[in-house]
Amino acid sequence: MKTVSLTIDGKKIETRHGEKILWAALENGIYIPNLCGLRDEAESVASCRLCFVEVVGKEQAVTACTEMVTEGMVVNTRGAEALRMARSGFELLLSSLPMDCAHCVKSGSCELQKIAHHLNIKLKSKRFRKLLRELPIDDSSSLFTYDPNKCVLCGRCVWVCRERLGVGVLGFANRGFQRVVTTFAGEPFGESKCQECGDCVSVCPTGALTFKNGKTEEE
Amino acid sequence: MKMADLSTITSAFQEIKNRAESHWRALYDSGKPVIMVGTATCGRAAGALEVLKAIRGELKRQNLNCPVIEVGCMGHCYAEPVVIISKPGYPSICYGHINPVITERLVKEFILGDNPCFEFVLGALEENDLVPSFSDFPRAKYEKRVILKNCGHIDPTEIDHYIAKGGYSALVKALQMQPEQIIEEVKRSGLRGRGGAGFPTGQKWEVCRRAVGEPKYVICNGDEGDPGAFMDRAILESDPHSVIEGMIIAGYAIGARYGYIYIRAEYPLAVERVQVALRQARKLNLLGNHILGGDFNFDIRLFQGSGAFVCGEATALVACIEGKPGIPRPRPPRMATRGLFAKPTAVNNVKTLAFVPQIINNGTDCFAGTGTEQSKGTAVFALAGKVVNTGLVEVPMGTTLRQIIFDVGSGIPGGKRFKAVQIGGPSGGCLPEAALDLPIDFDSLTNAGAMMGSGGMVVLDEDDCMVEIARYFLEFTQRESCGKCTFCRLGTKQMLEILNDITQGRGKIDDIGMLSQLAEDVKAGSLCGLGQSAPNPVLTTLRYFRDEYEAHIKEGRCPALMCQDLVAYYIVPEKCERSCDACVGTCTVEAISANKKRIKVVDQEKCVKCGTCLDACPPQYNAVVKLSPPSEVPGSE
């Protein structure tokens, strides 16, 4: 297999030809904030807009999940411009979330906490005004709870349900600020065609989909 | 193409052309006056269908058997409904602001009699000694009609009219060329995409031709959604075959098998006329298998987009046709290599495609001979807003904004002062008076912070508040955001919240800094063109009209007296007439009463700021005024 060598944050890396910067970095222990990406997706979703990195020779910061590696590429994940964009995007996400870590079962394994730590941002950031939607929580499934208020709309659950499992219970509805992950016609999970495999819960980076009864993610 | 095919094609087309020309000549050879009514959407909105009915009715009553033809939009939308009468012995005369009553007079006095009714004349189509012609208008000096030349002069539902005017001859010429040769011609002409971004068309086609994958597609993007823009609609309604011909040539050049015309469902007339046009083209074998007997197969389908601004973005548009939600995806892969159904696809704007037959027919030099160094040819603008001559304008690239607004558009109505021009819709920006002498092309507009966009041009005068304009456009993009990516979904929402605060008098001085920072981030961070350009109205108003933002925030004052929360209505006691009660009667909330001296006073607590008192106050008194901030009202806190 053809390989490509590049440098990320000063570290020399060999990776597959055609690989995206994000996966090359993560595989080599270099963390780049990300929410929407899943390794086996054929095409990047590129919706969370957090994985900004700087590539030498490029004027603007680029998203690591869409940028393909090239031979001799020099990537800086901690450049000022990349961090500014990632922080801005992350703080926008935070502005739409309730941030109640003390009462959230996801606390400790939540991707948002990890990103906040990485970007050195307070989870209770006050830079933007809070814009909450106060959507009803769906507790009807026997296996998990869905709290759309904690959803970052990364779409991982939609993808696994539809593409990996071929079930398609989950999908996106509405436009703009009202966009939401939901079942068909918004029916409760308990009454939907959900087979309760729990894969959506496993891929959820936040506390939007959590197992009930203190069950942790099945390995 | 083989030589045998070539002679088949030319002779097949010659037959079609002969028939079309005799059909067209028959219109005028009868010796009867020919009446044309502009029934595009702009005309219909002004009552063209009633005029059409009235003309037909009156002709019948008078027992006259003159041909009455529905034509598209001539571009003089300010004068709709428009009627053109070509009577033997007279020049073709165009009448404006026609209604059924005037119609009757025109029939009785001009068609039956000899009085051309000068009082209703807009202009003659050709130079003559009787009435001033359009070419005598000052605007004629600046206009150059290339893709609008047929609009308003032919029946868009008659393919023969288009062919008689030279239509489809470019296709025949193109079919005798090598596809690479056509691409070379288009490249040499310097044609850039008229959808907004200005990507070189020939280059796009070349990538698409070389890309691997079959079948290839050509898509015509007719999802015109900018508020105030109506160029594509007018062309699709007035001259649909020019777009279809351009598409077939594009298809031949890139080696495509199918084409899609994507038209928004909110353009029912355009949909209808394109459908008719496609049927007619198919019937004459200008579309379908073995076009004109040659070996090129190409057919076009019409796809109706249903109501999302973001579907004008090429990747979202393609998703729609595939039956998926109209949501953009990251690029690359580019459309030209991986587009519709993952096949190479050329997505071109309506106007871009309409230029193609002109370039093939008249040569690249003719096209490249007009325009500026980097932007060749002409540009079509939809002139709207506070301008006397609203309508469609086609001018060479490099014409200045001042020439378009003041010479072609005849300036601002009501003696008001020009303030800004909003170009390119929600993706564009507001340019101030200082930018009026800017020669317009793709690059000059981008450098000024605006964008060519699809060509919407909304003129704003002193009564328009620039903060409110920015807020309006942001509210639009925010509502139309698909919500997929973080910056567009949440960034535009945050920006809108700030702008709402400023226009409602709750703005804080830090808001300006926050707004421009957010705008830059949304621009740089969004996934697709909608989000990347959504902050432009905010960025340009901040750049050119910062003082208005500051007045709102620091003084609670709206300089244009437009933001309701920052104005108050006040009746100047010295001007108020004791015996007049006009304002009292019209006030919907009984907020106006007369004091002991019979001077009228507005109760600011009750006033809902509807402004009816201002309109009601007779002009000889002019006693009602708007004040901002509301504390300017004498006696208020």
Image (tube, coloured by chain):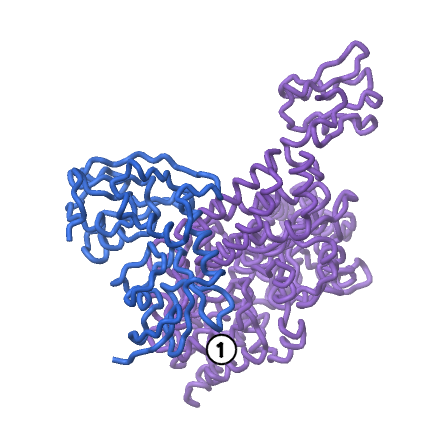
Residue at 63% across / 32% down in the picture? B564
Q: Nearer the viewer, residue A205 or B546?
A: A205
Residue position marked by numbered label 1 in the rendering: B13
Q: Is residue B214 left or right of residue A83?
A: left
Residue A56 in percent (x, y) is at 47, 72
Three-letter code for the amino acid on which mark 1 is drawn:
Phe
Number of callouts in the render? 1
Instruction: Give SS at disc 1.
Output: helix
Chain on which label 1 sits: B
| Closer to the camera in the image, B57 or B567 | B567
At x 77% / y 42%, what residue is drawn? B414
Task: Kindly identify the residue that appears in the image at 34 percent across and 64 percent down.
Answer: A22
The quarter of the rendered structure image containing the N terminus of chain A is bottom left
Query: Which residue does the image show at 15% across and 46% down from the upper left?
Result: A195
Residue A186 vs residue B520, the one in the foreground: B520
The chain drawn blue is chain what?
Answer: A
Answer yes or no: is residue B214 visible: no
**Residue B430 as seen in the image, left or right of residue A180:** right
| Residue found at the very far top of the displayed protein | B596
Shown colour of chain B:
purple
Tell me where residue B229 appears, x and y as whole percent: 58, 53
Give the vertical position of B514 relative to B205 (above or below): above
User: Could you classify mark 1 by the number of other residues whose Cα lies within 10 Å: few (under 14), some (14-19), or many (20 or more)?
Assistant: many
Residue B179 is situated, as x and y percent measured from the top left of the image, at 46, 82
Residue closest to the eye, A127 or B329: A127
